[in-house]
Image (spheres, helix red, strand yellow):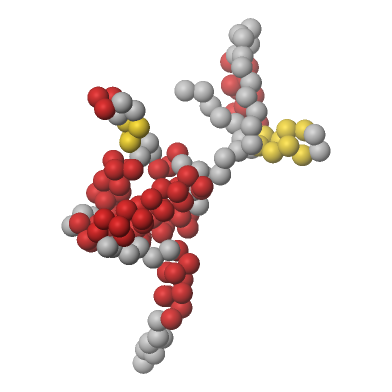
Amino acid sequence: MNPIFGGIIEQGAVQLDNPARYSQYYKSLEGKRIELVLRKEKSKRSNNQNNYYFGVVCKILGDYFGYNTEEMHEALKMKFLRTGACDLETVKSTTKLNTAEFEEYLETIRRWALVEYEVVIPLPNEMVQIHQQRPKINKK
């Protein structure tokens, strides 16, 4: 597998996140033909998306179907992230999805749960509103 080096372009110069690692790899290619790809970094799913997915989506559906959150996660991947031909299917990892792809995955799950099973999965902003509306309990 080929390493991917991140960084930023500032004032026309590349500033690498890990220049020592890049330098070591660069030197290992001495005398070999190379291929250079430069592209804007894709944003990975956020921690908030991850917490919502496991803490709300997988929890609600897991409770409904009788699975724990990890089992529900695996079942959802099998249902919605399979690719390939029938006899050679693979399942895409959710960690490989960027923020937009992950939100599309979540929306597909929410729609499926509602239409097929009448299970309502609140949106992340609805969870904040529900949390804010809870009465405060005074501990004595």
Q: Residue furthest left?
A: 66
Residue found at the far front of this picture: 115
User: Relative to 63, is 33 on the left or the right?
Assistant: right
Q: Please report the residue visible at 57 percent of the width from the left and 40 percent of the height from the top.
A: 42
Judged left or right of residue 22, residue 130 is left
| Residue 87: percent from left, percent from top | 25, 24
Quadrant for residue 23, please give it: top right
**Looking at this view, is 117 or 9 the one in front?**
117
Q: Is residue 13 left or right of residue 139?
A: right
Residue 43 in the image: above or below residue 88: below
Residue found 60% across the figure and 31% down from its top: 5
Question: Exactly how many numbered labels are in the figure?
Answer: 0
Of all residues, the one furthest to the top in this rendering is 31
Query: Where does residue 61 sit, x and y in percent of width and height?
Result: 27, 58
User: Compared to 15, does 67 lie above or below?
Assistant: below
- Against 6, residue 27 (above or below) is above
| Foreground pick, 37 / 6 | 37
Quarter residue 64 falls in: bottom left
Residue appearing at x 26%, y 55% in the figure: 116
Where is residue 122 shown, x and y percent of the image?
39, 65
How far across and down, in percent of the image, does residue 49 sit? 46, 55
Residue at (41% x, 86% y) in the render: 136
Q: Residue furthest bottom?
A: 140
